[in-house]
Image (cartoon, helix red, strand yellow):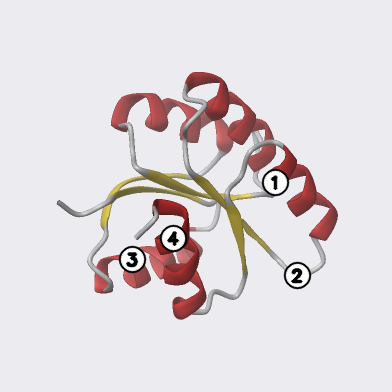
Amino acid sequence: MANRILIVDDAAFMRMMIRDILTKNGFEVVGEAQDGAQAVEKFKELHPDLVTMDITMPEMDGIAALKEIKGIDPNAKVIMCSAMGQQAMVIDAIQAGAKDFIVKPFQSDRVIEAINKTLGL
């Protein structure tokens, strides 16, 4: 069975890029969210195997959403997505329980490597 992934990013273009990379590599994208609050709701509803989470978003940022998701499921697997120059936020995210991070613009081999490593594939 394909691993089920939830994509969270406030930019539709970024969600589309990740979706393309994932589907071409045999993953199932079960949902998308455009902010942290929506991400938490979708996580509760869909129970994905993994979440790709943008750090900087309106409403609720990725780190706050990560903490809420970890509160719901301590074993949740979340990979943060960040732009260059957000190292401090990436460190906060890892401390909050993120499994890995990928940097924008996305390199498809790095995205797949991070996901495979996080899922233990």
Q: Which mark is residue 113?
A: none
Q: Are marks 4 and 3 in contact (CB under 8 Å)?
A: yes
Say whether marks 1 and 4 touch (CB < 8 Å). Answer: no
Residue drawn at (70%, 65%), measured in percent from left and top? 83
Callout 2 secondary element: loop
Residue at mark 1 to residue at mark 4: CA–CA distance: 15 Å
Circle 3 is placed at which residue position?
Answer: 22
- Please state the horizontal and vertical placement of residue 80, each as a whole percent of the image: 60, 52
Q: Are discs 2 and 3 less than 8 Å apart at CB?
A: no
Between the C-alphas of marks 2 and 1, the distance is 16 Å
What residue appears at the point 47 percent right and 66 percent down from the top-left corner?
13
Of labels 3 and 1, earlier in sequence is: 3
12 left or right of 36 in image: left
Q: Which three-letter amino acid code belongs to the residue tagged 2?
A: Met
In what quadrant of the picture does the C terminus appear?
A: bottom left
- How packed mark 2 is, by other alpha carbons closer than 10 Å (few <14, some 14-19, many 20 or more), is few
Task: Give amino acid for label 1.
Answer: Ile
The location of residue 101, given as percent across then percent down, is 62, 59
Q: Is residue 47 above or below residue 2?
A: above
The residue identified by callout 1 is 94
Q: Residues within 10 Å of mark 4 (few under 14, many from 20)?
A: many
Q: Position of 77 compared to 121: left or right?
A: right
Q: CA distance from mark 4 to mark 3?
A: 9 Å
